[in-house]
Image: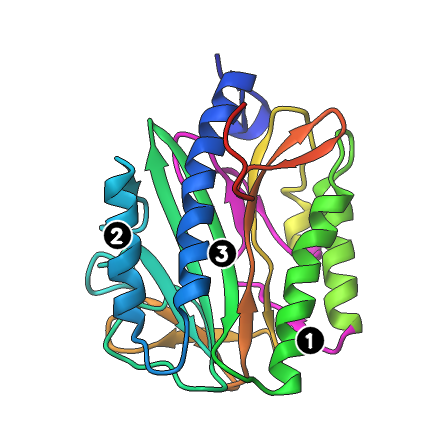
């Protein structure tokens, strides 16, 4: 049985966490397949087609397909978000062919048996520059650091501060306009989960409690943190200065011992 915490945060039972893990395992499998397939010459539409086939074969529903937002001219048309180079998030799969030296951030979400899984990784296309490789490593490490810092009783701002300090110490920047989120029966639940700390988001800070399920997703820019919408469909978010960006995400459950990753490929017990 779900239990509502303060501010609309829904705590999950052990059974619900295992259902979230099943959805997360499917997402992990899709991203594993993307990682095996990414290479110079492949299109992001081809990556999406394979993902949609895997999701359908598992009896799941792609979370992103059909989602609307006030900025966009069309509902999101794909199962994957594929964001290339300076694109931060929400890139629409297309006939664009990936080239050696590109990096592509791939975000995948599914609903399986009524529960959601959501995860993202950034992939190198062939050989990439040392700077792009470092950006990917730092963003992945920022996610790992956040997961290591989770424990019941901590304020989220303590974790977000660690993310920001680490990223900025590596001379990169944390995106402010997009944040992580709670996850459960819906893709976006309370609370909002920033990867930085400022006076404004401290007003909505929250304490980590056992049973919370969170999608943590640092988005890191090689240059400045500002972003804007790119492309005529008004979905794709890109860095304002044209520098590369990377994105990693895991869905996790807060446990008595820390964080339990739900999108690492482990199947329910």
SS assignment at label 3: strand
Report how far apart the C-alphas of labels 3 and 2 lie in the structure. 16 Å
Residue at 63%, 42% (x, y): give it: 204
SS assignment at label 1: loop
Which residue bears the numbered disc 1?
172
Which of the two residues, 50 or 111, is positioned nearer the viewer here?
Answer: 50
* Residue 199 seen from this side: yes
In the rendered image, the vertical position of residue 125 relative to residue 259, given as above or below? below
Total marks placed? 3
In the rendered image, the vertical position of residue 144 relative to residue 122, given as above or below? above
Q: Is residue 114 left or right of residue 102?
A: left
3 or 1: tag closer to the N-terminus:
3
Q: Which residues are magenta?
A: 170-199
Which corner quadrant of the image does residue 196 belong to? bottom right
Which residue bears the numbered disc 2?
52
In the rendered image, the vertical position of residue 218 relative to residue 16, given as above or below? below
Residue at 55%, 53% (x, y): give it: 249
Residue 158 percent across, percent down from the top left: 78, 47
Which residue bears the numbered disc 3?
120
Residue at 47%, 47% (x, y): give it: 28
Which of the two residues, 51 or 63, is positioned nearer the viewer here?
Answer: 51
Name the colouring of the figure: rainbow
Residue at 77%, 44% (x, y): give it: 149
2 or 1: tag closer to the N-terminus:
2
Q: Is residue 114 left or right of residue 213?
A: left
Give the label, 3 or 1, closer to the camera. Answer: 3
Cβ atoms at labels 3 and 2 below 8 Å apart: no
């Amino acid at each position: 049985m779900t239990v509502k915490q303060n501010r609309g945060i829904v705590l999950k039972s052990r059974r619900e966490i295992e259902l979230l893990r099943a959805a997360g395992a499917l997402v992990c499998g899709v991203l594993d397949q993307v990682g095996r397939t990414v290479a110079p010459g492949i299109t992001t539409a081809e990556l999406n087609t394979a993902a949609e086939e895997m999701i359908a074969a598992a009896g799941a529903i792609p979370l992103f397909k059909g989602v609307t937002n006030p900025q966009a001219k069309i509902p999101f048309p794909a199962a994957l978000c594929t964001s290339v180079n300076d694109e931060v998030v929400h890139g629409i799969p297309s006939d664009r062919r990936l080239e050696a030296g590109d990096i592509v951030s791939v975000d995948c979400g599914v609903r399986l048996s009524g529960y959601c899984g959501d995860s993202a990784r950034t992939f190198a296309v062939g050989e990439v520059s040392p700077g792009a490789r470092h950006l990917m490593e730092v963003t992945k490490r920022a996610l790992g650091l956040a997961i290591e810092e989770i424990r019941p009783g901590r304020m989220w701002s303590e974790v977000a501060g660690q993310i920001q300090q680490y990223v900025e110490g590596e001379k990169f920047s944390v995106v402010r306009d997009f944040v992580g989120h709670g996850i459960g029966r819906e893709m976006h639940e309370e609370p909002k989960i920033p990867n930085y700390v400022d006076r404004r988001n401290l007003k909505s800070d929250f304490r980590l409690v056992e049973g919370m399920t969170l999608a943590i997703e640092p988005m890191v820019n090689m240059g400045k943190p500002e972003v804007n919408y790119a492309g005529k469909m008004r979905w794709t978010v890109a860095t304002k200065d044209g520098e590369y960006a990377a994105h990693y995400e895991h869905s996790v459950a807060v446990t008595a011992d820390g964080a339990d990753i739900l999108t690492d490929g482990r199947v329910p017990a």
